[in-house]
Amino acid sequence: MDLDVFVTAHRAEWDRLDHLLRRGRRLTGTEADELVTLYQRTATHLSLIQSSAPDPRLTARLTQLVARARAKVTGTRRAGLRDAAHFLTHGFPAAVHGSRHWWIPTAVLSTLLAAVIGWWIGANPGIQSAIGAPADLREMTRPGGGYEAYYSSDPAASFAAQVWTNNARAAAICLTLGAFLGIPVIGILLLNMFNLGVGIGLMSSAGRLDVFLGLVLPHGLLELTAVFVAAGAGLRLGWTVIDPGPLSRRAALAQRGRAALGMAIGLALVLFVSGGIEGFVTPSGLPTWARISIGVAAELLFLAYVHILGRRAVRAGETGDVETADRGAERPTAA
């Protein structure tokens, strides 16, 4: 394509579009129709120039024109209650359900790893002595000691807020740093599973594993599920860097990244619930069976929510991405 000839042929249209966009008053019906037509033509021109004869200055000008025209044509839209309801009933559960082939194996393997670490530490006194001095370990595992005192160290509301903040930060890190080939996500998982395994091993060696599980399970089921969902989504994002599928790598990462951002918001709500359980239920005077039952009920409700609403939303074509009108224009790619 001869770029000079192309520019000469279409400069008047671009200038006219720029003039319409600069108008301070409301456009007439005829002018509005003209603006839509020129917007569509300019978007086509931009695509042709990008694919055939890329010129940085011209591309920048047309990109700006198309963006301004798109904003003028589509208008601005504010998020409202309807958007929030759609996110909670379609977007978030669809994103979690759609990434289940990543986070379910992550959950299974991570849980097995924590169990193996716990067995290894519990069966080897030499490993326990490497973790801490015998007096310190006895203090941690005795009745009313470190592990039990942890859940009543602060007022319930303050403790719940602190736990929620820490867990939400961990989930957000998994989601945002997954693009680095998933390596940071694996590190976070290993650290969490090691800490859990240490608790299992030390308390089992002291003959108090039932107490430890009674403290962890009420909130841990939902909390760890949220972490596993975030880790699975992060690993999926990292794999997209390697294999973007039918889309271009940029488009695929943008799509997965937008879905991951939505999942971060949704998981923050899930972790808020688990933090509330950890702050108010775990240290309460309820019997162990009642505390664990509350944790199991919360976990089952979340899994049912993801399975029922998520599967229905995925079948309807929902991916967890933002609405089409809110996405940037994507450049077509050759097959």
Image (cartoon, rainbow, N blue to C red):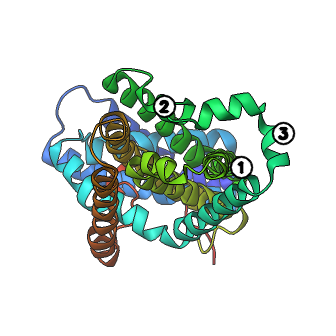
Question: Where in the figure is residue 55, as x and y percent of width and height?
Answer: 69, 47
Contact? badges 3 and 2 (CB < 8 Å): no
Query: What residue lies at 14% left-to-right and 41% top-to-bottom?
Result: 28
Q: CA distance from mark 1 to mark 3?
A: 33 Å
Query: How many marks do you count on the picture?
Result: 3
Which residue does the numbered mark 3 point to in the structure image?
130
Which residue does the numbered mark 1 point to in the structure image?
180
Q: Name the foreground residue: 70 vs 125.
A: 125
Q: Secondary structure at mark 2?
A: loop
Label whose residue precedes the other's in the sequence (1 or 2): 2
Which residue does the numbered mark 2 point to in the structure image?
144
What amino acid type should be assigned to the residue bearing mark 1? Phe
Quadrant of the rendered structure where residue 268 is? top left
Callout 3: few (<14), some (14-19), or many (20+) C-alpha neighbours within 10 Å? few
In front: label 1 or label 2: 2
Horizontal side of 230 relative to 288 (left or right) equals right
Locate the N terminus by quadrant. Answer: bottom right
Q: Name the foreground residue: 326 vs 69.
A: 326
43 relative to 99, above or below? above
Label whose residue precedes the other's in the sequence (1 or 3): 3
Q: Secondary structure at mark 1?
A: loop
Question: Where in the figure is residue 321, as x and y percent of width and height?
Answer: 41, 58
Contact? badges 1 and 3 (CB < 8 Å): no
Horizontal side of 32 relative to 279 (left or right) equals left
Residue 68 visible in the snapshot: yes
What amino acid type should be assigned to the residue bearing mark 2? Gly
269 relative to 2, above or below? above
